[in-house]
Image: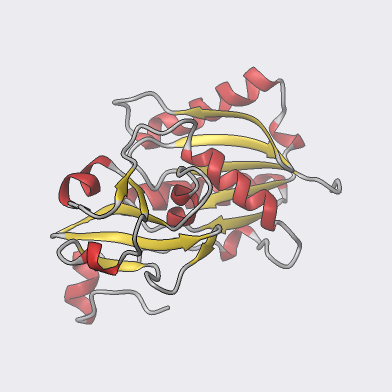
């Protein structure tokens, strides 16, 4: 593997899945799936189109990255399963990137940021960040929308999906609603490139989604709403 590996990243945790290819700090290209098409049937054609546009063979990719959640349960399963298949097929390693950490990068640099995704039932998946690092004032978790703004520092910038913005008032926060430039896979790729190492990457079999909240069937079976860390 080269000193600065060629990494392929995918996001399927959010409404519009996307791919990105990166080498070090250079984002070589990114591509979102076609709107209105199911992720399962549109994901691999979008990858083929990205690689064809860049003139890159899949065999040249030296590692994979995937947004591991939280987010859409079905989307996360599709993304992780796809990366597992690609990594197994090429013998490459992979790295999981928290979805909210990637989403927080949609905000311009400077000052605290909170990333939100709709979790339904009056809740959001939320996490706070400062200087690109997780913030103690809002650890990643499932948070009731009511009262969320009281937990945010003054001037906090908020990024997220449309549904989360519709539920969150955020009167004292600086709301930065979508659409955002580029793709979330591009931000996943940036984080993966900055943190990639043999010790941080894993074999494909070790990749697991981070749902945070259990599916209803699991809640009924276990009596627990949330995953254990």
Residue 95 locus on image (x, y percent): 61, 57
Q: Nearer the viewer, residue 198 or 207?
A: 198
- Pinpoint residue 130: horizontal percent, then vertical percent: 50, 61
- Pick the residue in front: 127 or 193: 127
Inspect this view and state whether residue 122 appears.
yes
When the figure is inspected, residue 135 is found, relative to residue 73, above or below; the finding is below
Residue found 40% across the figure and 71% down from its top: 139
Give the side of residue 46 with respect to residue 42, left or right: right
Q: Quadrant of residue 219?
A: bottom left
Q: On the image, which quarter does residue 220 sit in?
A: bottom left
Residue drawn at (64%, 20%) of the image? 52
Residue drawn at the location 42% of the way across and 28% of the way down = 33
Horizontal side of 174 relative to 104 (left or right) equals left
Residue 129 against residue 187 in the figure, above or below: below
Q: Residue at x 30, y 43 (%)?
A: 161
Query: Is residue 5 positioned above or below 200 on the image?
Result: above
Q: Quadrant of residue 163?
A: top left
* Position of the C terminus by quadrant: bottom left
Residue 213 shows in the view: no
């Amino acid at each position: 593997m080269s000193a600065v590996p060629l990494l392929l990243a995918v996001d399927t945790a959010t409404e519009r899945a996307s791919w990105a290819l990166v080498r070090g700090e250079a984002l070589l290209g990114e591509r979102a799936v076609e709107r209105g098409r199911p992720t399962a049937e549109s994901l691999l054609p979008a990858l083929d189109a990205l690689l064809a546009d860049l003139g890159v063979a899949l065999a040249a990719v030296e590692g994979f990255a995937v947004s591991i959640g939280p987010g859409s349960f079905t989307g996360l399963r599709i993304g992780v399963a796809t990366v597992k298949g690609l990594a197994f097929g090429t013998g490459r390693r992979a790295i999981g990137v928290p979805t909210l950490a990637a989403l927080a990068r949609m905000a311009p640099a400077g000052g605290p940021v909170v990333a939100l995704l709709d979790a339904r039932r009056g809740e959001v998946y939320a996490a706070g960040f400062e200087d690109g690092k997780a913030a103690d004032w809002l650890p990643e978790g499932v948070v009731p929308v009511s009262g969320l703004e009281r937990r945010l520092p003054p001037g906090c910038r908020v990024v997220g999906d449309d549904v989360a913005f519709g539920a969150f008032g955020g009167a004292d926060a600086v709301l930065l609603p979508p659409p955002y430039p580029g793709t979330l896979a591009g931000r996943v790729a940036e984080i993966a490139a900055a943190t990639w190492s043999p010790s941080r990457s894993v074999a494909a079999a070790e990749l697991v989604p981070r749902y945070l909240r259990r599916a209803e069937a699991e809640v009924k079976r276990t009596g627990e709403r949330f995953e254990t860390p």
